[in-house]
Amino acid sequence: MIAPEEFLEDTRDQGLKELEEFLRIPSISSQPDRADDVRRAAGHLADRYERIGLQNAEVIETAGHPVVYADWLKAPGKPTVLLYGHYDVQPVDPLELWTSPPFEPRREDGVLFGRGSSDDKGQIALHWQAIQAWLRTTGELPLNVKVIAEGEEEIGSPNFEEFVRTNRDRLKSDYCVISDTAMVAKGFPAITYALRGLLYFELRVEAANTDLHSGNLGGIAPNPAQALAAEILTSLKDPAGHILVPGFYDGVKPLSEEERQQFARVPFDESAIKQTYGLTALHGEAGFTPTERNWARPTLDVNGVWGGYQGPGAKTIIPAWAAAKFSCRLVPDQDPKAVAQALPRYIEEVRPKEVRVSLSKLSGHGDPWITPVDHPLIQAGQRALHRVYGKDPALIRGGGSIGAVEVMGRLLDAPCLLVGFVLPDSFAHAPNERLDLESFYLGRKAALHLWEEIAAIGAPAAARPASVQP
Ligand SMILES: [Zn+2]
């Protein structure tokens, strides 16, 4: 009998061919005329899961594109892990910028080109190949696995929360593993252990029932645009980037020394960012590095301001109303509900009394999410990656949100491990998306060890982070 590692070595080419088959299905979730292809990709994946020896493979309907499910639950006493990926892909426009057709995978110099090769079909494939290596060689997995692949991640997972709610019992697991992120650099893997949440608001400021003549009523009538721009919005944040809403920072935990050190291991090229985006300088709170501000500090940003006359030439009015959209990125242990209540209270306080304001919360999604950095699940991930890459992975956070992570963490009450095996410059969502093959093969190996390392920490009762032990 050969070892699972050896099986992976022997099946490199076969594994790549299977991925290429999967990549040929144009499962673009946002385009209605591709709905049949999305469904075909789901069926293809369910078949694959069955063929590698997973059980109960099923295409589960939702109100939108289906979710693929399969499991292997024959390791009594061992933990159960829910593995998440998504089989839908982004549109391919502009097509003329692709050097070869996006759904005809092409290999060149150790790179596989094709839509979905990194995001996320390549990562789904490396996991199924690691699972297959276990099942084909030892006949079993080191723990219980439930695999799901979503078909609507690229359109914001509109039906995922409902899906998890409806299938809560079937999905119940001790841990979640998600491979839809990237490494720091080639050979330098990363574990993401926290993400920011999002609150989004629209603010409307009104005074008169019509636009007014700025001569006839100038000096008499209140001006909502002026009130919005010069009095309300400027009260939200000081020029140094500190948010002035009372209670806004409640619950924000200071970064530990170890977290700061971990962040500092990740290269941050300020001049490259400035050059890429045409910035003359970066901006943000004093006392934090750019990475710390981006990953671990909350923000408030105005997303748009409008109102008054915006056509050509002059129009001498005092506008009847003005409006703005603004949003906050929230960090772990901030309470989104408390922030959502503090904001209207504060705006009511700072508004000039001769204008009326109304603040509505738009469907922001995503509470902040974190798995404590000293959680055994994170440590199991670190060990698995160390075995393959010969170095400690970076422990990082993300500045944005991943809807599925927050939903699974909240509804399944299970800690999540986010580990990705693709390069940061994979051109995900862009023309010429690619997969670095060396990283793909290493990822298969790391995925193999991951199950072993998670099995070793046992179920959560035994695996509690040091930070929450009495
Ligand atoms: Zn993705």
Image (cartoon, rainbow, N blue to C red):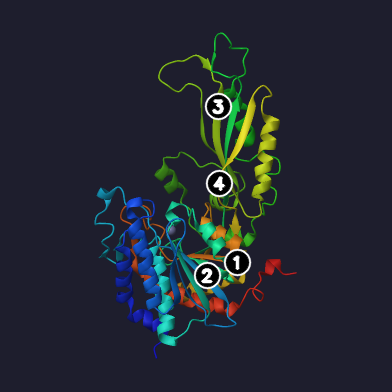
- Figure check: 298 above or below 109: above
Q: Quadrant of the C terminus?
A: bottom right
Q: CA distance from mark 2 to mark 3?
A: 47 Å
In terms of image quarters, where does ligand 1 lie? Answer: bottom left
Which residue is at a point 60% across and 19% down the rendered structure image? 208
Using the numbered discs, state the Cα–Cα distance from disc 2 to disc 1 in whole angstroms.
9 Å
Q: Which corner quadrant holds the N terminus?
A: bottom left
Whichever of callouts 2 and 1 sits on the residue coming sooner in the sequence is 2
Q: Residues within 10 Å of mark 3 (few under 14, many from 20)?
A: many
* Earlier-in-chain disc, 1 versus 3: 3
Q: Quadrant of residue 34?
A: bottom left
Q: Residues within 10 Å of mark 1 (few under 14, many from 20)?
A: some
Residue denoted by label 1? 414
Residue 198 versus residue 189 in the image, above or below: above
Q: Residue furthest bottom?
A: 1
- Please count the marks in the image: 4
Say if disc 3 is inside 8 Å of ligand 1: no
**Can I make out residue 238 in this image?**
no
Q: Earlier in the sequence, mark 2 or mark 3?
A: 2
Q: Residue beneath label 3, please?
A: 322
The residue singled out by tag 4 in the image is 364
Q: Which kind of residue does numbered mark 2 sit on? A: Leu
Is 238 placed above or below 401 here?
above
